[in-house]
């Protein structure tokens, strides 16, 4: 925990305490109280960008309330996602994304949007970032997870779904709260938040979180996966002999700062900063990477927004949103791996920013007919992940004045950087109609015109049919797209040998080449769902989905290498191109049940089963493969028993064999797989064990199983990534 981060946390907490309402009367138990039957008649905003009953949207939406977050002990977004149907999570398997997360089989977190109060808080450029403890949940009122295509309202990257984290207002909190956790492997987690209604219509809430952990020494728990071997270059030179090798290391840290000011009931200002640090050796074999603690991947995202909401007339409402978003891979990020010959010259950098303005009008034709119309304009800048640099990127120096040279070229070949500026204009319409009490339809379409890759149309059509008061049938067809990122289009990497050809050009055996003509990936999806309340305490949901994806971006080897570096000669190169197709289909079944056992005992039970199948074809003539990184069968079960101020929560996961990213050489057309596994988490809590003080004990992987996540496809990465052994956490929570 650095002095800088400790200072940020301390100052933020002091601010929280000073603005807190001194006589707050709400206690933790009041925050947890929510009638179970109301969970199936919740008001949501994510599915249609307007407030509606969850049963009135054709989309499948899961809502996680503050009660769930507290009692199930979710601390970050990845904890919550791991507990949901249809989600695959492979923890600490990827160097730049850390966790690998898939929603309905769509690979990695670039396929779904992450919003906070309807504002995107991940990179607006679509670049992949870690989704880990840098997306905490301590300050949320509820989380709405929308499955399926949502590009008709949200545009690019609302491909497989949308996650909207909805924060509390200051008047909801009216006080301050601090939470601290310590655990095994030097785990430390601190949150603080405070809210106050300064006067009617003037409302402030602020919060911060700080987290660090060393992670378990995996070489002790998985010695066969982490032997100490020679660190050799590709040409066989030993750079670090086995007897001098370091132990495994995997420390991580994160922090966030959050603030929301409601100036009136009509206008809101918000700010969110998130930072995450992990090691670039994450997921790598010992033979291909050094586990040095200064080999860091440091990601920072900042979002500022202003929102105005007005009722122009009884029927016409206006919503104006201004956003500014920045994303940086900080210049301290670097590799010590085989690609930089284990030398201290693998520095990285990337940056993107966005300015945007969106205007939405909602017109109420009647109690049963609503029209939404919106326009937006965004201006973007993106510098993708730069090639490996021998020195840190000079952040305050213009790109054309950077003084970096490709290694092994005697400072003769300046590194070629590509950046891009582009704009996006959009228009969207959605018409929602209740034709009768039992039947409603939703029809929407969005047009985006992007100066980088052209225009796209994305329609959405859905209906909701209430068979009776307890049974709802939904259907949704939609199209969506994922925009190519600058890193996919312009990100380059490779090395020079130090030798020259007869023309005096430096020779490279391989380089990734740019592709300035990448197009968006396009999906067409159909989903059917059925929900039924057997009675007020038992609710079940079934959904089936099918999706076809075209223009999938995949890596293609080039017959003729692209010579894009003046003074260099590249023997072999590849690039990203729109050559693949995918098919996804599956079912999710979930159930929620609550029962009172008398004498104050209450039990909550939830569970899901998910099945997914499909195939991916990386190019037209390539054999079709199973979907990467998915487990066809997933069972997730949980229960919470509460009595008075005490509760006990258990979670059980059975995750079937998962495909990795590597082809199985013994079975053409098949992927290597990880073994199936069983996992159990155990949580105990005592709310207000002393006045305003609550205590919790969390045991993750309580049975101390050894299990694996699906690893990467490269020869330098682990195909089966060892996962964390048992860990124990103890927490205290105090309300002021």
Image: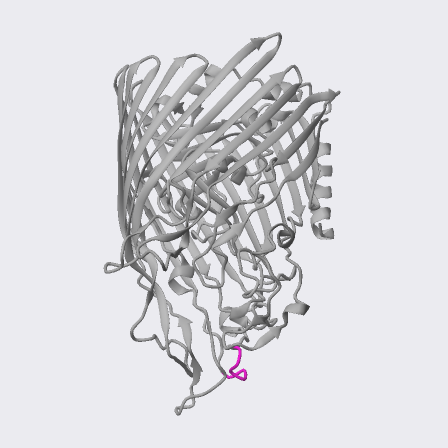
In this picture, which residue range is highlighted in magenta? 407-412
Q: Position of residue 178 (x, y in %)?
A: 70, 33
- Return the residue found at the far right: 690
Corner quadrant of residue 662: bottom left
Q: Position of residue 699 (x, y in %)?
A: 64, 34
Corner quadrant of residue 370: top left
Residue in the foreground of this view, choosing between 103 and 123: 103
- Give the number of callouts: 0
Please report the residue visible at 34 percent of the width from the left and 75 percent of the height from the top.
562
Q: Position of residue 689 (x, y in %)?
A: 73, 21
Corner quadrant of residue 22: top right
Q: Main secondary structure of the magenta part?
A: loop
Residue 157 makes an appearance in the image = yes
Residue 118 makes an appearance in the image = no
Please report the residue visible at 41 percent of the width from the left and 72 percent of the height from the top.
511
- Return the residue found at the far top: 599
Residue in the foreground of this view, choosing between 606 and 137: 606
Left or right of 33 in this view: 608: left
Please report the residue visible at 55 percent of the width from the left and 65 percent of the height from the top.
287
- As drawn, 334 above or below 583: below
Q: Position of residue 576 (x, y in %)?
A: 35, 62
Residue in the foreground of this view, choosing between 128 and 119: 128
Q: Is residue 374 magenta?
A: no
Residue in the foreground of this view, choosing between 212 and 633: 633
Left or right of 166 in this view: 661: left
Name the colour scheme.
one colour
Give the quarter of the figure containing the C terminus: top right
- As drawn, 254 above or below 374: below
Left or right of 334 in this view: 1: right
């Amino acid at each position: 925990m650095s002095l800088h981060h400790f200072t940020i946390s301390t100052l933020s907490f002091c601010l929280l305490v000073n603005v807190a309402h001194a006589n707050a009367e709400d206690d933790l138990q009041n925050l947890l109280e929510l009638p179970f039957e109301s969970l199936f008649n919740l008001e949501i905003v994510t599915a249609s960008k307007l407030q509606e009953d969850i049963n009135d949207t054709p989309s499948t939406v899961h809502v996680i309330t503050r009660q769930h977050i507290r009692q199930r002990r979710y601390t970050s977004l990845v904890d919550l996602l791991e507990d949901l149907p249809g989600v695959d999570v492979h923890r600490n398997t990827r160097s730049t994304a850390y966790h690998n997360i898939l929603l309905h089989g769509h690979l990695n977190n670039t396929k779904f949007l992450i919003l906070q109060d309807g504002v995107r808080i991940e990179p607006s450029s679509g670049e992949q970032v870690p989704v880990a403890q840098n997306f905490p949940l301590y300050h949320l009122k509820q989380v709405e997870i929308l499955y399926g295509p949502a590009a008709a309202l949200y545009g690019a990257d609302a491909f497989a779904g949308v996650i909207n984290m909805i924060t509390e207002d200051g008047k909801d909190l009216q006080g301050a709260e601090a939470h601290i956790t310590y655990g095994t492997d030097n785990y430390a987690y601190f949150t603080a938040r405070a809210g106050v209604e300064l006067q009617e219509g003037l409302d402030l809430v602020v919060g911060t979180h700080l987290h660090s952990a060393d992670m378990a020494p995996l070489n002790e728990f998985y010695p066969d996966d982490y032997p100490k071997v020679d660190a050799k270059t590709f040409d066989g030179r030993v750079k670090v002999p086995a007897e001098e090798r370091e132990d495994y290391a995997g420390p991580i840290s994160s922090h966030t700062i959050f603030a929301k000011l409601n100036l009136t009931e009509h206008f809101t200002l918000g700010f969110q900063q998130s930072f995450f640090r992990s090691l670039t050796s994450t997921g790598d074999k010992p033979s291909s990477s050094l586990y040095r603690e200064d080999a860091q991947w440091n990601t920072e995202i900042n979002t500022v927004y202003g929102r105005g909401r007005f009722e122009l007339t009884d029927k016409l409402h206006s919503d104006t949103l201004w956003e500014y978003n920045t994303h940086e891979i900080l210049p301290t990020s670097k590799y010590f791996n085989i690609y930089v010959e284990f030398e201290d010259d693998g520095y990285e950098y990337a940056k993107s920013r966005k300015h945007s303005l969106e205007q939405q009008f909602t017109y109420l034709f009647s109690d049963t007919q609503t029209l939404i119309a919106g326009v937006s304009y965004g201006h973007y800048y993106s510098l993708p992940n730069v090639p490996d640099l021998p020195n840190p990127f000079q952040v305050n120096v213009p790109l054309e004045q950077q003084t970096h040279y490709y290694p092994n070229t005697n400072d003769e070949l300046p590194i070629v950087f590509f950046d891009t500026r582009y704009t996006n204009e959009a228009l969207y319409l959605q018409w929602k109609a209740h034709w009768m009490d039992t039947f409603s339809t939703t029809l929407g379409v969005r047009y985006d015109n992007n100066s980088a890759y052209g225009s796209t149309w994305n329609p959405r059509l859905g209906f909701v049919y209430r068979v009776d008061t307890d049974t709802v049938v939904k259907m949704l067809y939609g199209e969506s797209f994922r925009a190519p990122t600058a890193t996919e289009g312009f990100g380059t990497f490779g090395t020079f040998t130090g030798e020259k050809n007869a023309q005096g050009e430096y020779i490279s055996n391989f380089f990734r080449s740019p592709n300035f003509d990448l197009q968006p990936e396009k999906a067409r999806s159909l989903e059917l769902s059925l929900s039924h309340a057997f009675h007020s305490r038992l609710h079940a949901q079934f959904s089936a989905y099918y999706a076809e994806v075209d223009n999938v971006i995949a890596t293609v080897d080039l017959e003729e290498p692209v010579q894009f570096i003046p003074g260099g000669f590249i023997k072999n190169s590849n690039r990203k191109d729109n050559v693949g197709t995918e098919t996804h289909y599956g079912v999710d079944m979930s159930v929620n049940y609550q029962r009172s056992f008398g004498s104050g005992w209450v039990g909550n039970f939830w569970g899901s089963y998910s099945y997914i199948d499909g195939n991916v074809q990386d190019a037209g003539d390539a054999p079709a493969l199973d979907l990467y990184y998915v487990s066809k069968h997933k069972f997730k079960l949980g229960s919470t028993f509460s009595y008075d101020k005490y509760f006990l929560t258990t979670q059980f996961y059975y995750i079937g064999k998962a495909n990795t990213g590597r082809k199985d050489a013994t079975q053409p057309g098949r992927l290597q797989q990880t073994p199936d596994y069983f996992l159990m988490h155990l949580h105990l809590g005592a709310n207000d064990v002393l006045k305003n003080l609550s205590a919790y004990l969390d045991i993750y992987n309580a049975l101390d199983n050894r299990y694996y996540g699906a690893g990467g496809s490269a020869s330098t990465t682990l195909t089966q990534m060892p996962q964390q052994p048992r860990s124990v956490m103890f927490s205290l929570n105090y309300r002021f």
